Amino acid sequence: MTVVGIQEKKGEYNGNAYHNYLIHCLKDDDNALGQISEVLKVKVAKVKEIFGKPMGLEDLDSIIGEDIRCYYDKFGSPSEIRVVEKSDTAAK
């Protein structure tokens, strides 16, 4: 998946506070023509756990345009996100 944008969403819903980052991505899908979009919702409280280090919105800006690999928990939520390292041969 390629990250194309990031949104910060926070507020209150039904008396419960929320604070999330929405990571907008494009990806290939065998059941579609072209690419499709996917939004990964990451709770700010779990960013360190999911990315393996603390990251604010300014830090997440650095992954825009990068390819990522997302691993999901049993509920379908992101449990780990890794930036895919580009090899030197891909640049040639």
Image (spheres, grey):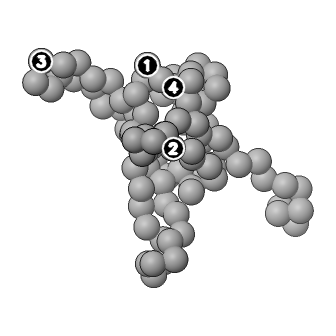
Residue drawn where x is 42% and y is 23% of the image? 44
Residues at marks 1 and 2, CA–CA distance in whole angstroms: 17 Å
Residue 26 x/y as whole percent: 49, 60
Q: Which mark is residue 45?
A: 1
Q: Earlier in the sequence, mark 4 or mark 3?
A: 3
Mark 3, residues whose alpha carbon is within 10 Å: few (<14), some, or many (≥20)? Answer: few
Q: Quadrant of residue 37?
A: bottom left
Q: In this view, which residue lies farthest toward the left?
A: 14
In the picture, measured across the screen, residue 34 lies left or right of residue 88, that is left
Residue marked by disc 4 = 47
In the picture, measured across the screen, residue 18 lies left or right of residue 82, that is left
Mark 2, residues whose alpha carbon is within 10 Å: few (<14), some, or many (≥20)? Answer: few
Are dots 3 and 2 in contact, CB under 8 Å?
no
Are dots 4 and 1 in contact, CB under 8 Å?
yes
Residues at marks 4 and 1, CA–CA distance in whole angstroms: 6 Å
Residue marked by disc 2 = 72
Q: Earlier in the sequence, mark 1 or mark 2?
A: 1
Q: Earlier in the sequence, mark 4 or mark 2?
A: 4
Instruction: Say which quadrant the N terminus sits in.
Output: bottom right
Kind of residue at badge 1: Ala
Q: In this view, which residue lies farthest toward the front?
A: 74
Kind of residue at badge 3: Gly
